[in-house]
């Protein structure tokens, strides 16, 4: 996962990066709008942390530009203004949340992690690697044969495939699949759902090709060599 941090205070920018550091997470540290826009020419971050007051413009304006260009990744705004009007303005420009300065890095970390847990790239349908996934019609096929998935299995599949190649922690999966907390009725619900999904989609569930376990962390949908070759070239 790539996160762009736009903050003109260099020490604070680095501190935010350290506070959010985690496995398979990378940061683009930018100290001006110019640097951020230059970075965007070659990168497409998965999340943004934007300061409002910058030496060459406003983080709010940049947020509005991102939304106008079709970027849907979560945006957290950093602001020294704590008036209700400023907060509303940030949300109206497309921000998902905000943190008011001064703030503790622990609070920022908690707010950002909450945003990342809720973020899912919406995918309506997929036709690849012998699979057909139609999440809107709840129609699934493997090698031309229908596969029956429960709503829970379909949500798990959509989340994994939407973030293919990326590791999703158990906590992220639990928050998306059972947002009302009902998972705690049965603590192994996620493991059972993964097992059932593998039994329906994998040729050899005991040695899965697609739904990979990342021990001690979570799961990911592995990117096939064919997919990598198509996108590389």
Image (cartoon, rainbow, N blue to C red):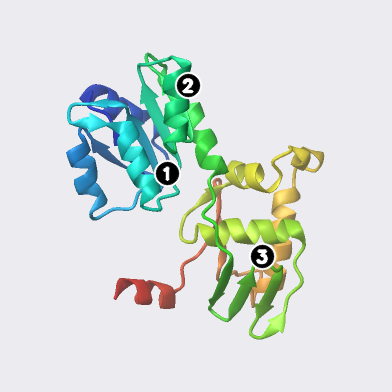
Give 207 or 221, whichever is nearer the viewer: 221
Q: Earlier in the sequence, mark 1 or mark 3?
A: 1
Question: Which residue carries the number 1 mark?
Answer: 23
For discs 2 and 1, the disc positioned in front in the rendered view: 2
Q: Which residue is located at x 33 percent, y 44 percent?
A: 65
Q: Earlier in the sequence, mark 2 or mark 1?
A: 1
**Residue 51 percent across, percent down from the top left:** 32, 28
- Work out whether residue 18 or residue 207 is closer to the camera in this orientation and state it: 18
Return the residue at label 3.
Answer: 136
Most extreme residue toward the bottom is 144
Q: In the rendering, which numbered label is found on residue 107?
A: 2
The local crowd at label 3, few if under 14, some if 14 to 19, many if 20 or more residues have their Cα within 10 Å, is few
Q: Residues within 10 Å of mark 2 (few under 14, many from 20)?
A: few
* Relative vertical location of residue 149 with respect to residue 7 in this rendering, above or below: below
- For residue 53, above or below residue 39: above
Are discs 3 and 2 less than 8 Å apart at CB?
no
Q: x, y percentage for residue 55?
A: 18, 27
Image-based side of 165 in relation to 69, left or right:
right
Viewer-nearest of discs 3 and 2? 3
Residue 33, image x, y percentages: 22, 37
- Report the residue at 75% width, 59% height from top: 151
The quarter of the rendered structure image containing the C terminus is bottom left
Q: Is residue 154 above or below residue 40?
A: below
């Amino acid at each position: 996962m790539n996160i762009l941090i736009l903050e003109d205070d260099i020490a604070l920018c680095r501190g935010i990066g350290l506070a959010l550091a985690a496995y398979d997470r990378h940061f683009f540290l930018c100290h001006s709008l110019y640097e951020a826009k230059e970075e965007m020419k070659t990168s497409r971050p998965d999340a943004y942390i934007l300061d409002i007051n910058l030496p060459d413009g406003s983080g709010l304006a940049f947020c509005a530009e991102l939304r106008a260009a079709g970027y849907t990744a979560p945006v957290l705004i950093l602001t020294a203004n704590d008036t209700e009007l400023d907060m509303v303005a940030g949300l109206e420009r497309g921000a998902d949340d905000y943190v008011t300065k001064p703030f503790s890095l622990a609070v920022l970390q908690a707010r950002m992690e909450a945003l990342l847990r809720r973020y899912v790239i919406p995918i309506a349908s997929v036709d690849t690697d012998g699979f057909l996934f139609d999440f809107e019609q709840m129609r699934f096929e493997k090698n031309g044969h229908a596969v029956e998935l429960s709503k829970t299995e379909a949500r798990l599949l959509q989340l994994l495939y939407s973030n293919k190649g990326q590791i999703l922690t158990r906590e992220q999966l639990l928050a998306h699949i059972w947002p009302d907390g009902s998972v705690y009725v049965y603590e192994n619900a996620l493991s059972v759902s993964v097992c059932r999904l593998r039994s329906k989609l994998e040729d050899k569930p005991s040695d899965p090709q697609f739904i990979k376990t990342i021990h001690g962390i979570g799961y990911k949908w592995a990117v096939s060599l064919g997919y990598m070759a198509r996108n590389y070239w």
